[in-house]
Amino acid sequence: MEIEVKFRLDRDIKHIIQQFATFEIEKVEEDIYFNSPSRDFRETDEALRVRKDVEGFSITYKGPKVDSETKSREEIKLRVNDFNAAVELFKKLGFREAGRVVKKRTIYRVGNAIICLDDVEGLGKFVEIEVECDDLEKGKQEIFEIAEKLGFDKGESIRRSYLEMVLERKG
Amino acid sequence: MEIEVKFRLDRDIKHIIQQFATFEIEKVEEDIYFNSPSRDFRETDEALRVRKDVEGFSITYKGPKVDSETKSREEIKLRVNDFNAAVELFKKLGFREAGRVVKKRTIYRVGNAIICLDDVEGLGKFVEIEVECDDLEKGKQEIFEIAEKLGFDKGESIRRSYLEMVLERKG
């Protein structure tokens, strides 16, 4: 289970993060999302993504969100050796490209959690706080404590995905 | 494009193969095949497979056969880092397990082609001759020349997949 919150960034919080978290990597992530031929992922709240970044290529499936305050959900991630073959595979299986998200992501680590400073093409800046944990309540407590340190309140949490925001923006 | 023929083996041909081909590897391949939620792969003549062997894990999509004498077809192959996650991914996407094929495969190489001596659980022994090539006629000539050296005739070629044979056997 991936337990995750997202907030819009309207101020610089890097200096606060650096007080308690460790810089891990800065990278560009290029994501292609797919929709299924057998059900509409916008309605089932699922996602299928093929990602390219400096660390390699991956396929990720995300199940429906399981919590009203966060964007926590089941996640299956697979590293693969070939980005174009992964895209081609899903197209052959009848999946259609739903949209693309490109962002510069700076990752900091604190305990089991990561803090991602994201600059998303066309959308602007956000912070995501994530922990992989099978205990939803425990994980939520952990990420909301970090959110509070950064000056964010539960009520400001954005549950929409970058893909949804990119598609809304395109109208 | 994967250009391929298969013959049933009722005699030992290892000594003939060793005269002109080089031993590459002997391994056990464990394959799980999936059927799609959006179309019946038995009717569309497609295949989706997750494989585990000593070299690692892979996902393979095979398109419909494009030739009446061989089992040649488009193939997209992806190496992945996690067998169980790959199986789980397709299940989450609505694919259903169609069957399993387990075989001991001994691979020999000659030029661009490979010769596979297969001992398939529940089915017996076969030889497959394969070449990856975008020129179907050139590839067919290459594999039928090898087949002839091994004493097989075009007319004996089996176009059914191991999965189809396993499922037929189960009735």
Image (cartoon, coloured by chain):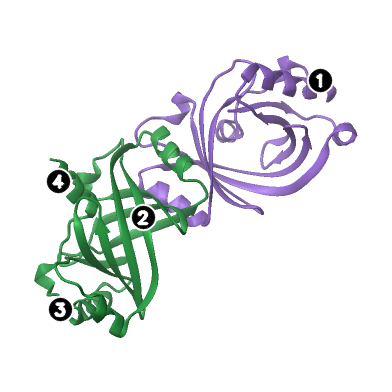
Chain colours: A green, B purple
Structural distance between the alpha carbons of marks 4 and 2: 20 Å
SS of the residue under disc 4: helix
Asked if residue B70 is positioned above or below residue A35 in the image, the reply reads above
Q: Nearer the viewer, residue B49 or A30?
A: A30
Is disc 4 surrounded by few (<14), some (14 to 19) or many (20+) residues within 10 Å? few
Which residue carries the number 2 mark? A29
Which residue carries the number 4 mark? A169
At 47% from the left and 51% from the top, the residue drawn is B86
Question: What's under tag 4, amino acid-wise?
Answer: Arg
Discs 3 and 4 lie in a common subunit: yes
Residue B112 located left or right of residue B19: left
Chain ID, mark 1:
B
SS of the residue under disc 1: helix
Q: Are marks 1 and 4 in contact (CB under 8 Å)?
A: no
Which residue carries the number 1 mark? B148
Name the spot of residue A144 as percent of width and height, x first: 20, 77
Residue B100: quadrant of the picture: top right
Q: Are marks 2 and 1 in contact (CB under 8 Å)?
A: no
Task: Kindly report which numbered mark, 1 or 4, lies closer to the viewer in this rendering.
Answer: 4
Name the spot of residue B153 as percent of width and height, x first: 77, 17
